[in-house]
Image (cartoon, grey):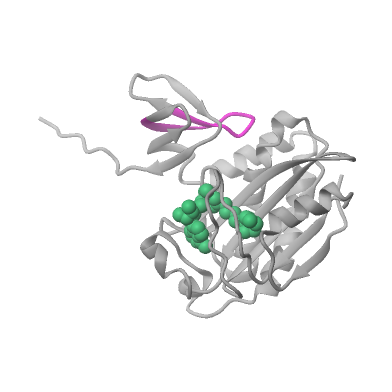
Amino acid sequence: MTFAAAILRFESIDSTNLEAMRQAKAGAPEGLCIVAAEQTAGRGRLDRKWHSPKGAGLYFSIILRPKVEMTAWPLITLMGALATTDALVAACKVKPDIKWPNDLCVEDRKLCGMLAETAETVDGPAAILGIGINLLASGLKQFGDQAISIEAINGRQPDAERISTALIAALRDRYVLLQSQAGREHLIREWCASSSYAFDRRVAVSTASGQFTGLTRGLDSDGALRVENQEGKVISVRAGDVTALRPSITLQS
Ligand code: BT5
């Protein structure tokens, strides 16, 4: 149920997720990590890009072959968010907020993005978990106040090696836990305790089938975000973007 981590390093690569996918299809075992100093085609969700200039971020992917049914695979993104939080606390004393489903933010600015994908391989389906962490402030100007780096938070450049070592250790621990009995309930509980988005947050939700606003009401057991819409109906959001809205002001007469 656990893995021996090995790291493949690249100076420059298209995307660590794409390389992990190629390696998984070629039979790589779970635990293989891909780390690159630069990505020339770093990927976000829905064909978006992850800005990955040389030396300015940690660009990391890991191959997993989870022994849980596929309906629980969306929990891998949430597990990644918790493991990255553990690693940033341990290595840099930074405690980010988790924004559903795949962002870590500090002061509502994106510090880290996560991209979980699946790959069909001869050894069965694999999950590729990609994690991008902004280390340096340089190169983020184009995002204005939407993005932030560890350097900007701590006032000094972080030790990338220390973060990736802490990240692999945290991923191993969280992965073992996820596959243990009651591991999923534990994960959901801890996620909710680590995210200001879990409960009573006014959000705008944008999905392939439309947009609506509402109040967050925790997570389903498969990691879907529960959002109560204006009509009081709770909708489970499995894929989409969530944006925080300012709390509505109630005027008293
Ligand atoms: C994500 O997508 O946040 C997933 C990012 C995953 C990146 C890692 S790096 C290692 C591995 N290999 C890959 O190729 N990918 C993974 P999404 O939620 O769709 O957010 C993408 C959006 O974030 C973009 O459209 C930009 O607006 C913004 N963005 C791009 N680069 C950024 C950066 N470095 N810092 C903050 N925001 C960024």
Pick the front one: 220 or 71: 71
Pick the front one: 131 or 9: 9
Decide whether residue 241 is among the magenta residues. no
Residue 151 point in image, percent of width and height: 51, 75
The residue sitting at the left extreme is 253
Q: Considering only vertical position in the picture, is 204 above or below 61?
A: above
- Give the extent of the magenta segment: 212-227
Q: Please indicate whether residue 140 sits to the left or right of residue 76 in the image.
A: left
Q: Residue 125, located in which quarter of the rendered image?
A: top right
Residue 160 point in image, percent of width and height: 65, 73
Q: Please indicate whether residue 248 sits to the left or right of residue 202 in the image.
A: left
Residue 109 point in image, percent of width and height: 43, 59
- Quarter of the N terminus within the rendering: top right
Q: Please indicate whether residue 5 sits to the left or right of residue 157 in the image.
A: right
| Residue 94 makes an appearance in the image | yes
Q: Main secondary structure of the magenta part?
A: strand
| Ligand 1's quadrant | bottom right
Looking at the image, which residue is at 75% across and 60% down?
Answer: 168
Looking at the image, which residue is at 38% across and 38% down?
Answer: 203
Looking at the image, which residue is at 55% across and 79% down?
Answer: 157
